[in-house]
Amino acid sequence: MMQGAAAKARRIVSRGRSTLGNLLALSRGIDAVTAFIGRRVAWLILVAVLVSAVNASIRKAFDLSSNAWLELQWYLYGAVFLLAAAYTLQKNEHVRIDFISNMLTKRTRDWIDLLGHIFFLLPFTGLILYLSVPWFLKSFHSGEISGSAGGLILWPAKIMVVIGFSLLLAQAFSEIIKRIGVIRGDIAEPYAGHDSPPAVDEAASGYTKGERS
Amino acid sequence: MILELIAHELAPIMFISVMGMLLLGYPVAFTLAAGGLLFFWIGVELSVFAPGEINLFWNLIQAHPDRIYGIMYNDTLLAIPFFTFMGIILERSGMAEDLLDTIGQLFGPVRGGLAYAVIIVGALLAATTGVVAASVMAMGLISLPIMMRYGYHRPLAAGTIAASGSLAQIVPPSLVLIVMADQLGRSVGDMYVGALWPAAIMIGLYILYIFGVTLIRPQWAPALPREARTLGDGVWSLVAVLALAVGVHFATYHTIFSGFTYEVRFVWSVTTATVFALGLSLINRQFKLGLLSRLAERVIIVLIPPLALIFLVLGTIFLGIATPTEGGAMGASGALVMALIKRRLNFNVLNEALLATTKLASFVMFILIGARVFGLTFYGVNGDHWIEELLLGLPGGEYGFLIAVTIIVFILGCFLDFFEIAFIMVPLLAPVAEALGIDLVWFGIIIGINLQASFLTPPFGFALFYLRSIAPKQAWLDTVTNKMMPEVKTLEIYRGAVPFIIIQVIVVGLVIAFPQLVTHYKGEKSGIDPNSVTIELPAMGGGALTMPNFGTGTPGNEGGLGLPPLDFGGGSGNNNGGSLGLPPLTFGSDTPAEAPEPAEPDAGPDLSQPPNFN
């Protein structure tokens, strides 16, 4: 009977493993998608820079101004920061106030992250997504156009909120799966270790990379 | 009973709870948003107990998508990625290295020369890249080893580098000033003009401090030995070229360009003089004429790109040719061209710079989103009133308030990033400052200088972290002198920062004591209706006049916590109408001084003035 219980426990563990295995595969899939999108939209910054510089020069040189070009800049920027939010989360780049958590053990921090993902991040992204879908649809169906003369149609900007928060919600699930995996010891810590604040590490690594190239 | 008590004290409870949640170390953006939503729910449930104080109801939550959209629709914040991108590209183009090498040579023969060079290069980098991390790291990697090699007092060397690198916080076009302008509802251009004198005084005091050290402790800051001056002497020919250039400037100013308006004349004559000096140096180098010393030639060639960029960005903004956002775009394009000319630009560099910019932009904007979710609830539970009463109760009126704010911001700055302070604290402090009749640009600059000081304050000062991350942690063999050098101790970095923190405190004191150091911006405006910048303009409170945004397609451009669209079922804004931290006089007329601008105005530096009244 003891043996039976042990075997049963093993079976449950292995089933747990394989469920988690599937979930980890899902998490990898989500990460791949959000990283792909995040890395692509970054180039829109370059487009926004060029649009803004050219627009300013043309306005000065020929006294021509177009609201559409001005609005295009913030459409692009909105797309960048909303669509890259999930990627930024995946890279652990959303800033934290970490002077207390640095004193906690790794395990406590893992739990804070897990509970934070479940109780802070999920409700927030879920709610905004829930609210923004009808808000976007209303704009889409009414063909709403920006108030300024020659302005652009608005729904492409509004759909960025919907897409951005959908990606963020998906990333939240992926982070929860990964954090459970880390706590159970199934996967290694996905974030690199830090001796200094992440922003400093990032800048330092960027700098030394820049030096080498 | 207990619920009633909680309902009446919901604002302080909410504030303290959410701040406590932030300390858990979960990302700030999501913690703020979750705290806002949690207390929204609590507030709605408890609103029956304190009907006059809690103005929250379920439908209000539908304002969130529009409030996020309002953040997107913000021309000022667009400057953040532009300037960040420009800074990273400049960092990769090796401008800091070139400047340090050359200016170090120029000042090398003087006692304390390397320290002066670090301060001057720090100021130049601050005025172009505006990124503290890049400046501190570049100078730490290049100058720190040289300063140690030639026997500089180590804390002095470390402190000078950290402090000079942090100048990027306050010297225009700093991101701090952009964010502050957005949060205070002032124009970025005014912020930049207002910051000029305080920044110049600060740089002056840094130099004075080094000068004092060379008098009292000459052994702390020795001159470079002769064999280390690879560019040789020849300061006089540099002086001669500079004199010639100034001559060209005055000559063209009074002849060729005399037909133009003041600004255009000035810009063109300066440009001609600069092109003249550069042309002379390039011709001298190309044909080996030997008219100029090698030192003079190098200095001029190296100084031109940063000066050109400073002109491209700040010059165009100050002259009203470009908005700060466009200035950032021009600067970023200029940086790209510069990096291309220096052959430092390739796909990888560009890709990495864009990714770093994207991640920064994303976390900054999401803190702002989180702060606005928090703000909807916090204003709904009359949190702004609570803060106002708390701070207006301080003794000493205007100065008591400013000193209290200085201390609060300085302490917070030791623990928090400036984005958090700007997005959480500043919107709460601004209405109080406004109620006391404090000029908000002046107020913003005071906070900016404070934040810079906190960048240098151990143990959490970011500049110190940046320097620590690249300073040698182990003893190393110096190849030039063939001596073993001991590692840089963290305590040495901390000790070196202390005199510079004192300097910052002095500058804060000066700016508080002499507001005209900042407020001269009002007199220097060109081409702007002075009415559009009167102090009485409601800044944060502008949103109170905003119509509800639901689906109108003209989202409010409020900053920071912003204000909830206060459509409490029609005109029931009983104690909210005039109470959002605004002096009553702003409601005296229904046409505020600033004309309601279209969402995308087309010219002039006041573009960055958030159109609060749409």
Image (spheres, rainbow, N blue to C red):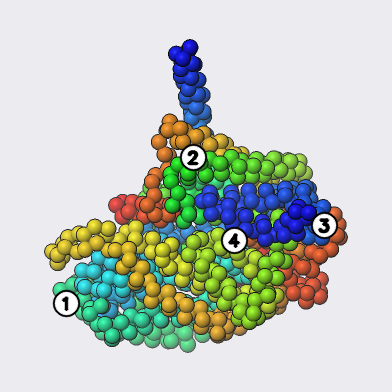
Give coordinates of residue B325: x percent, y percent.
56, 63
Residue at the disc numbered 1: B226
Spatial CA distance of label 1 from label 3 is 79 Å
Spatial CA distance of label 4 from label 2 is 28 Å
Element class at badge 1: helix
Q: How many marks?
A: 4
Residue at the disc numbered 4: B423
Question: Nearer the observer, disc 4 or disc 3?
Answer: 3
Spatial CA distance of label 4 from label 1 is 51 Å
**Subunit bearing disc 4:** B
| Residue located 38% across and 46% down the image | A193
Spatial CA distance of label 2 from label 1 is 54 Å
Residue lying furthest left: B482
* Res. A33 in view: no
Quarter of the view holding residue B208: bottom left
Residue at the disc numbered 2: A35
Element class at badge 2: helix
| Front residue of this view, candidates B519 and B474 | B474
Question: Nearer the observer, disc 4 or disc 1?
Answer: 4
The amino acid pointed to by label 1 is Arg
Closer to the N terminus: mark 4 or mark 1? 1
Residue at the disc numbered 3: B51
Element class at badge 4: helix
Residue lying furthest front: A1
| Front residue of this view, candidates B280 and B537 | B537
Closer to the N terminus: mark 1 or mark 3? 3
| Residue located 52% across and 65% down the image | B412
